[in-house]
């Protein structure tokens, strides 16, 4: 099971790269191109609504809980998590959509990024990812239920739609 946490560390590393691109790219846009930044915010609203719609409509899949995972090296597990994150454009889109809601991008400095955003992001991702891993191990048999999967997807849809509404509320 240690390889699962190596995958999580890879995911966290990829997220930090995307977070950095989003923070500094959006800060530059916010300072230089206010109209473009507003368009990006509305694009983010659309994207979050799209994610909500996808979660809401997603089909539940059967999951085999008795399948044993193959042993992986920690390095390959880390690289797997890292490449999954880096190959997923939704990660950067998520940060582009969420950052303007959470922080004032015009106030971002290297010190704030290094001393606040990086440790906070790492802490949240490790805590949430670790809880998901431990929770999944504990309830993996229950996750095979189509009813439970439907509830999870509907909850995720609600969360994405709420984030979109929050962005709209900041613009209006």
Image (cartoon, rainbow, N blue to C red):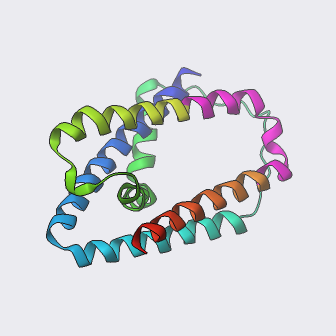
Q: Main secondary structure of the magenta part?
A: helix
Residue 124, percent from left and from top: 46, 35
Pick the front one: 102 or 159? 102
Residue 109 placed where, x, y %?
Answer: 17, 45
Q: Nearer the viewer, residue 79 or 60?
A: 60
The reply to whether the magenta stretch includes residue 131 is yes
Q: Is residue 102 above or below residue 16?
A: below
Q: Residue at x 40, y 72 (%)?
A: 171
- Give the percent coordinates (x, y) of residue 111: 17, 37
Q: Quadrant of the N terminus?
A: top right
Q: Is residue 47 visible?
A: yes
Location of residue 80 by image quarter: top left
Point out the image quarter for the C terminus: bottom left
Q: Residue furthest top?
A: 2
Residue at figure coordinates x 66%, y 63% from the top left = 55
Work out whether 33 lies above or below 17.
below
7 left or right, relative to 111: right
Q: Nearer the viewer, residue 39 or 90?
A: 39
Task: Specify start and end residues of the magenta stretch as a single range.
Answer: 130-149
Q: Is residue 158 left or right of residue 121?
A: right
**Residue drawn 38% across the image and 44% down it:** 15
Residue at image position (78%, 42%) is 143
């Amino acid at each position: 099971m240690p390889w699962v946490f190596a995958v999580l560390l890879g995911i966290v590393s990829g997220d930090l790269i995307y977070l950095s691109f989003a923070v500094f790219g959006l800060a530059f846009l916010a300072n230089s191109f206010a109209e473009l930044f507003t368009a990006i915010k509305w694009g983010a609203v659309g994207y979050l609504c799209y994610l909500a719609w996808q979660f809401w409509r997603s089909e539940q899949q059967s999951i085999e809980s008795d399948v044993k995972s193959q042993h992986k090296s920690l390095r390959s597990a880390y690289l797997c998590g890292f490449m999954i994150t880096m190959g997923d454009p939704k990660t950067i889109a998520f940060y582009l959509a969420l950052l303007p809601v959470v922080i004032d991008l015009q106030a971002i400095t290297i010190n704030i990024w290094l001393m606040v955003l990086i440790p906070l992001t790492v802490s949240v991702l490790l805590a949430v990812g670790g809880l998901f891993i431990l929770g999944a191990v504990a309830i993996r048999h229950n996750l095979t239920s189509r009813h439970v999967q439907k509830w999870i997807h509907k909850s995720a849809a609600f969360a994405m739609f709420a984030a979109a509404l929050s962005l709209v509320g900041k613009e209006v």
